[in-house]
Image: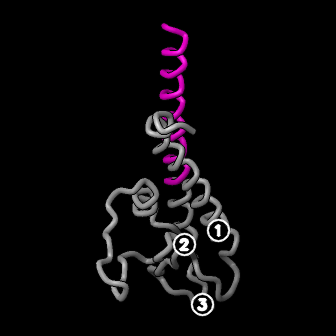
Amino acid sequence: MTNALRDHIGFHAEALMLGERRGAILASNIAQAATPGYKARDIDFAAELARRNGMGTLAASHPGHMTAGAAIDGGPGYRVPVNASLDGNTVEPAVEQTKFAENALRQQASLTFLNRRISGLMSAIRGE
């Protein structure tokens, strides 16, 4: 992908890939809702998207400094439950379903924006 094209559609393409990854993690959480000891995981979507696009990151000025965030490499972290379960499972179905629906809505918005950007590029190529 050329730099101009990456600049034009890159943000929404990154959002789609990150949303797909988050959707898989949330679906796994929902599937494991009855598994004793399972710990719910999630990605901080906004922080990871900013990190991938080079925005809002703090640079450590010394090798001993720690970076902010739940997961240093941008990977999924564990969710702290509102209501703890007796069997050690931290999945709360209502929370997971809400997060899954929110993620699906973000995916749809990113697809809509990306489609409009590509349609605009195609119109420019055709000279319309």
User: Label 2 neighbourhood size at 10 Å, few (<14), some (14-19), many (20+)?
Assistant: some
Instruction: Identify the residue position indicated by label 3 in the image.
Output: 88
**Could you say which is closer to the camera, residue 11 or residue 107?**
11
Look at the numbered discs 3 and 2 and tell me whether their residues touch, using CB distance below 8 Å: no
Amino acid type of the residue that numbered disc 2 sits on in the rendered structure: Pro
User: Label 3 neighbourhood size at 10 Å, few (<14), some (14-19), many (20+)?
Assistant: few
Q: Main secondary structure of the magenta part?
A: helix
24 up-or-down from 121: above or below: below
Picture disc at residue 76: 2
20 up-or-down from 35: above or below: above
Residue 71 in percent (x, y) is at: 47, 76
Residue ID at (64%, 68%): 30
Of the 4 image quadrants, the one containing the N terminus is top right
Does label 3 or label 2 sit earlier along the sequence?
2
Secondary structure at numbered mark 3 = loop
- Is residue 44 in the magenta section? no
Residue 25 in percent (x, y) is at: 62, 66
Secondary structure at numbered mark 1 = helix
Side (left or right) of 60 relative to 30 = left
Secondary structure at numbered mark 2 = loop
Quadrant in which residue 69 is drawn: bottom left
Instruction: Identify the residue position indicated by label 1 in the image.
Output: 30
Look at the numbered discs 3 and 1 and tell me whether their residues touch, using CB distance below 8 Å: no
Does label 2 or label 1 sit earlier along the sequence?
1
Residue ID at (49%, 47%): 106
Q: Compute the Cα span from label 3 to label 2.
A: 19 Å
Side (left or right) of 92 relative to 7 = right
Amino acid type of the residue that numbered disc 1 sits on in the rendered structure: Ile
User: Label 1 neighbourhood size at 10 Å, few (<14), some (14-19), many (20+)?
Assistant: some
In the rendered structure, which segment of residues is drawn in magenta? 102-128
Residue ID at (60%, 65%): 26
